[in-house]
Image (spheres, rainbow, N blue to C red):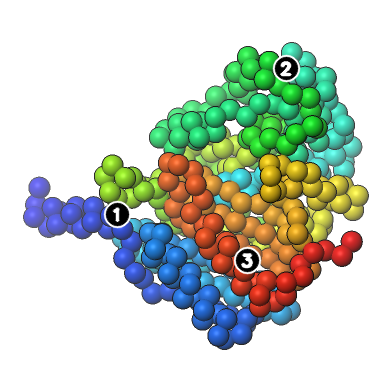
Amino acid sequence: MPLNLKICACLSALALLSPAASAATSSNTLFSEDAAERLDHKIEAIVRQNNLPSVAVGIYIPGRGHYTFVDGFADLETRRPRRFDQPFRIASVTKPFAATAILVLVDRGLLKKTDHIDKWYPQFPNADKITIDDLLRMRSGIPAPNDDEVLAQVYDAPLAPAPPLAKELQTYAALKLQFIDPNTVGVYTDFNYDILAGIVQEVTGQDIGTLITETVILPLDLHATLFPTGIDVPGGLHGYGWNPATGRFDDKTLFNPPLAGASGAVISNIADLHTFSRAVCKGTLLKPETSKEQLEGQPLGSSTNYGEGVAVGHGFCGHSGTINGYSTDMYYIEKLNLSFVINVNRLDRDNKSRSTAILDLVTQTILSELGQNTESEK
């Protein structure tokens, strides 16, 4: 190997060890100058302390102002800085897209939320009891698999073919004794949305990606948003996962979209997610009653209320998501008419969100600077 290629290879390997500091950029017309500077410095500190390749944050109130922050690298090999407008995999933030698209079918009279799934899958356990609404709300009573094991398998083999729905239905049906009555307990599992995607195919003849595109992406004119068919992410923002065995980052950008499907396949960027979060949380794509019901939350776990594909409570509405290489948070605060989006291009094999510390910081800053009372006045 020529000497210069050896040097380049060494530099490329070194680049993936740990992201060195890059010049952060920010813009602010929303907070006081002091508050914005404090937020800048604290996010920078989290990026360094938590070894994040990059982060982008956008906070926006129409007619009042914005705050944006971007720091780090889109590509650790080339050291290209991250740009604010670059798309990323939004993971489970896909669920509000899928749920809203399905509710458009409800508004069109093609589905009823009270429909039982035995119309399409009569052999499945409790099919005569589980409704479309139960699936949307994670209240189907279908047992959740060991998510850590499932997600670790996907992390290790992100280009593997996705199992067909028929095989998944058989796998879950074998757990029949673990099923509980629907609409009794909220249990978060992606399989609910796999079934919904199958029902969409049966009812419309379209896959869920086409439905999301036609009912959500195109009506909202979301230029950077897509339900991908290829394995790459457009725009050059790589996703990374830390490998403790090698002491360096692995590039986790490439991913087979059907592995995430209706639960997590969508790619978007911060500007589009601002638009989408407002649309779903203000109900602009649905009939008023349909939107109202979508945002009515029921307990999911000990600290979350979940509507139809949307996390709600304390005046907040939105979703968070993790997928190979990316951690994302998207929320809208009704009382402030404020939307905010956070993305970090890192997710490790443990599937623990790498944006949580920044989410906590951003939330605290918003509440302290713009008002504590975010509870909606119904």
Q: Amino acid at mark 2?
A: Phe
Q: Amino acid at mark 3?
A: Thr
Q: Are marks 1 and 2 in contact (CB under 8 Å)?
A: no
Q: Amino acid at mark 1?
A: Leu
Would residue 232 appear left or right of 296 to someone viewing this image?
left
| Nearest the eye: 133 or 184 | 184
Is residue 206 visible in the rendered image? The answer is: no
Give the label, 2 or 3, closer to the camera: 3
Label 1, label 2: how far apart the Cα atoms are: 46 Å
Is residue 148 visible in the rendered image? The answer is: yes
Q: Which mark is residue 16?
A: 1
| Nearest the eye: 202 or 316 | 316
- Looking at the image, which residue is at 51% across and 79% down? 38
Q: Earlier in the sequence, mark 2 or mark 3?
A: 2
Dividing the picture into quadrants, the one containing residue 201 is top right
| Nearest the eye: 208 or 303 | 303
Q: Which residue is mark 3?
A: 363
Q: Earlier in the sequence, mark 1 or mark 2?
A: 1
Q: Secondary structure at mark 1?
A: loop
Position above or below: 292 against 178: below
Q: Residues within 10 Å of mark 2 (few under 14, many from 20)?
A: some
